[in-house]
Image (cartoon, rainbow, N blue to C red):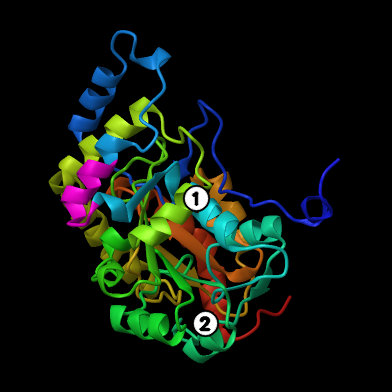
Amino acid sequence: MFRKAIHEMAPYVPGEQPRPGRRLIKLNTNENPYPPSPQVRRAVARAARGQALRLYPAPQADDFITAAARRYGLSRRMILAGNGSDELLAMLFRATLGPGDRVAWATPTYSLYGTLAAVQEARVIAPPLGSNFELPLEELVRARARLTIVCNPNSPSGALTPRHILARLARLLDGRLLAVDEAYADFAEETALGLVRRLPNVLVLRSLSKSYSLAGMRLGLCFAHPEIIEQLGKVKDSYNLSRLAIAAGAAALEDSAWMLRNVERVKRTRAAATRRLLKMGFAVPPSSANFVLARMPGRDLGPLAAGLRRRGVLVRHFRAWPDALRISIGTPADMAALFKALAPLAAPLTTSRRNGPVRS
């Protein structure tokens, strides 16, 4: 009944979502710990008035796109809206890749890319990141892929590839498409958005889930030259954003000052959490996102993640990268609860790292 590729592929597995009523501190899916702008709630209430919900929304999410054009200083023709940046990624894969076409990214990175490639039966070329999470430029260029993706800042490492490196990569790709997935860009020191004005093969994706605190509303934006936006629009669902989402997105973008204040709070907490983890003996690379990566090279931290869950704290552990935990930045109270639960669990591991193997 289904294509062979679908039968054989492994589905993407999102981070655990607690059941309603389950009290867990959720530091596993990189949500913003602070609420969205109050203007968002008011805009959603207005959008739901009267008979509005019986009517289809604007197919091109006009109010959201207009607000994005003002916020980022780009033409409306250079912007496409999606049901989260995940939908925009799915559209990008669908529009550019067929069976056997090459797609490239450096690993480890966002695992949804592999799922989307499997759906399209594309050939994945995935060289490893460098020891300091630097981009393997030569390998990505040598792949000659129809589509190259850079998650920047990267997940799960939080590392930021400088804009000039991305510009160099785009030029070396010789017209082939470079997609820069900037879900966490508002927490970073710089972004690649300006490259879409100068380089016709660069596409930038943004999400309102992280910095704008709208993970539950599912809003994303794609920025690129009008010719790219036109082609992606051909594979877009007719009405991919609801009336409520369009209103929420426009209101959020119009109150970016609220978002920026929350981002600064997250960044301060991120710095404090990094210092604490380093003191506990974890290796923590500099993060430009709203999470940190805590590593103990050579150790499987799966039991540590399980122990934290039993104590009411969720963090993300990846089987493909067993010696690391990705920890979302919560409120100071959330982080205090994390460290209270983590200290007794991590102490034996850090002690054995200093003293060598523990004899049983």
Q: At 30% from the left edge and 8% from the top edge, which residue is drawn? A: 50
In the rendered image, residue 131, in percent from the top left (x then y), is placed at 49, 87
Q: Identify the residue at image location x=47%, y=53%.
A: 232
Q: Mark 2: which secondary structure? A: loop
Q: Which residue sits at x=48%, y=66%? A: 156
Residue 170 drawn at (x, y percent)? 40, 80
**Residue at which label 2 appears:** 129
Asked if one can make out residue 170 in the rendered structure from this viewpoint, the answer is yes
Q: Looking at the figure, which quarter contains the C terminus?
A: bottom right
Residue 322 horizontal/vertical position (percent): 63, 69
Provide the residue span drawn in magenta. 65-75
Q: Nearer the viewer, residue 274 or 190?
A: 190
The kind of residue on which mark 2 rests is: Leu
**Would you say 10 lies left or right of 30 here?**
right
Can you say whether 350 is above or below 21 in the image? below
In this view, the mark in front (2 or 1): 1
Q: Is residue 100 left or right of residue 227?
A: right
Image mark for residue 86: 1
Q: SS of the residue at dot 1?
A: helix
Label 2 or label 1, whichever comes before in sequence order: 1
Numbered badge on residue 218: none
Residue 328 is situated, as x and y percent measured from the top left of the image, at: 41, 55
Q: Nearer the viewer, residue 255 or 171?
A: 171
Please name the amino acid that badge 1 sits on: Asp
Marks 2 and 1, how far apart in space? 23 Å
- Is 279 in the magenta? no
* 67 drawn magenta: yes
Q: Quadrant of the N terminus?
A: top right
Q: Is residue 28 visible?
A: no
Residue toward you, 59 or 110: 59
**Main secondary structure found in the magenta portion:** helix
